[in-house]
Image (cartoon, coloured by chain):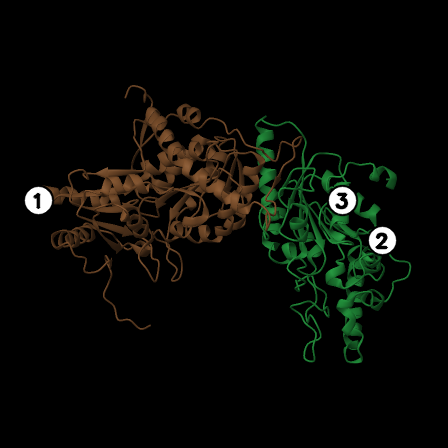
Amino acid sequence: MKIKDLTEKKERLTSGHRLCAGCGAPIVVRQILMGTDKPVVVGCSTGCLEVSTTIYPSTAWDTPYIHSAFENVGATISGVEAAYQSLKRQGKLDKEIKFVAFGGDGGTYDIGFQSLSGAMERGHDMVYVCYDNEAYMNTGIQRSSSTPRGAWTTTSQVGKAEPGKKQNRKNLTACIAAHDIPYVAQSSPSSWKDLVKKSTKAFDIKGPAFLNVIAPCPRGWRHPSDQALRIAKLAVETCFWPLYEVEDGEWKLNYKPKEKKPLAEWLKTQGRFKHLFKPENEHIIEELQAKVDKDWERLLKLCGEA
Amino acid sequence: MKNISKKRVVATTGNGAVAEAMKQINPDVLVAYPITPQTAIVQDFSQFVADGAVDSEYVTVESEHSSMSACIGASAAGARVMTATSSQGLALMHEMLYIAAGSRLPIIMPNVNRALSAPINIHCDHSDSMGARDTGWIQLYSENAQEAYDNTIQAVRIAENKKVLLPVMVNLDGFIISHGIEKAEFIEDRKVKSFVGERKPFLPLLDVDNPVTYGPFDGLGGYFMEHKKNQADAMERARDVILEAAEDFAKISGRKYGFFEEYLLDDAEIAIVTLNSSAGTTKHVINELRAEGLPVGLLKLRVFRPFPAKELAEALKHLKAVAVLDRALSSGFVGPLFSEVQTALFNLETRPKVINFIYGLGGRDYTLHEARKAFEELMTVAKTGKIKKTLGYLGLKEVEVLV
């Protein structure tokens, strides 16, 4: 795979959309859509990506696109796929078409969890991509079950009595892997080769596939708008966001940093963690580091790397 | 009646009749989720799929919210789509009902009417479909299994008509009709097939060479209000389309349908207006009262949305008094059907006195006794020209009230 070839592919999410400068979401979407040359129907849950790309009467999507509501892109795109299977079986349609659903972490980890779980269990031939920016960004930075412990959000405020979000984040990638579907992977737009390769695999595999992709949000994470990919890369290098895949139940690590960087290096790039560096909160950084270490060891074991 | 050569007269439940209609319609996609008392419909359909009797993709979702979401996806894709629900299921998909209608998707959904919790109750009332009044769905009501079957078939033609492109809900009473066995006449498969025809989708998602965007953001400075007006206009156009479909349906079935059925209404002085199965009981009592020489009649509404206000006013205007029966509550005011009927009559020069009875909540029996009680009250109103109480209850037990 050459980056030059990828740049020559037709853009299906075109320029002119109104996502913020430096937003991780459209970078993720464009890399995902580079993963297949087949026609793709895109589904989108309510969120930043949806409101910013389809401001009527304009649309940034040069491919069939449907949004219906927040908690149901799994079900919505599974309906589109079911129609496709039916019409194809009846000989009313002969093209090969791919189906992908995009949801943010609010629409995937939280309110859309049931709809996603149902779609995966039913075995639709579709790809579900979570662009994970670790909070409800479209409504103005509220905590989700993907928000890391200690992070400031507008519903996990920092004050004398509370140091930001109190709970650890949900391991959604593992939750979906537990569905025993053909393909589950975690990736980052900072590793474009890894992400496009996983997208191709997800589209090509018959049956459901799930990709969880980190998507930094300059507004919500409180970082300069030219830092998204660097911060995504640091999440990988600190092992906060490991790159791995689960294919037919086999766990495989796709990248092992030569030198595992301290989590604090990632935390300090973002204003949402600023308060953690105060003396009274330093124990939280230690505990977060311990959690990352434990999760990483567990992942290494699952991947046969320990 | 020569053209109904191979009709099948069967003993069937209402659910069985609806499932038969669905089989004959043979939708591209059938989305299924169980809920009492609808469940038997999707169970029957599962057997049709297992037997290879239908071409449908059978999608067994994990909730009614996903059920309507999958219907929306499949219908936007270009498929003919059906599902069925009841009560809490309809309430759970409430948000998606608006999106189905606002996206102008001709989804067909039988709703087996059942009370909404709390307290939990699995039996018939109309609080589910009345709660969905403003979602933008066309609503048809059915007195019995035959009408549920006939309405389901006609719904396809109404929904998919290019002048309409709106979803249709076909209502039938839970248990009373859904589970009661009665006689019905099924039309030949090939006639139903030709009556419903093939769906010719407008701007389908699966036309990948002509990509379209469904469900865009349409905020301030956009066209939201124009979209809603267009949708309301489509509902207006549905009036003619409903009557056209009924006319064509009469040709294959011999059964005539309109916005409502009038039973001994022409020469009546007092009448009941109602929906669904209570019409049968009311007709029986009308026969008894007529035998006693009393001028009583019935208007059984079939089409609730669009509401046939003009025609209804015309049909009721000569009466002295009308009782509207509501199998649903709107706590704090009168019943929902009463509101509509009262509004329809308001601008008449002279109009009947109108009273409201709440009946049959949570499946409470509406017996001959309750129907008689309603007529007795109407006779008093007609005689005195005075309404003592606008809102009354039929069949209410006398109990000690704690809260």
Please check whether the numbered discs 3 and 2 fall on a single chain: yes
Q: Chain of mark 1?
A: B
Q: Residue at x 11, y 52 (%)?
A: B383
The alpha-carbon separation of the residues under discs 2 and 1 comes to 90 Å
Image disc number at residue A255: 2
Q: Secondary structure at mark 2?
A: loop
Residue at numbered disc 3: A30
Which image quadrant for residue A295? Answer: bottom right
The alpha-carbon separation of the residues under discs 3 and 2 comes to 22 Å
Residue B37 location in percent, x, y?
39, 48
Q: Secondary structure at mark 3?
A: helix
Position above or below: A286 against B188? below
Residue at numbered disc 1: B292
* Camera sees residue A251: no
Residue in front for this viewpoint, A56 or B214: A56
Which image quadrant for residue B266? Answer: top left
Q: Tell me the colour chain B is drawn in.
A: brown
Q: Chain of mark 3?
A: A
Residue A72 location in percent, x, y?
59, 50
Q: Chain of mark 2?
A: A
Q: How many numbered markers are drawn?
A: 3
Which residue lies most toward the right here? A258
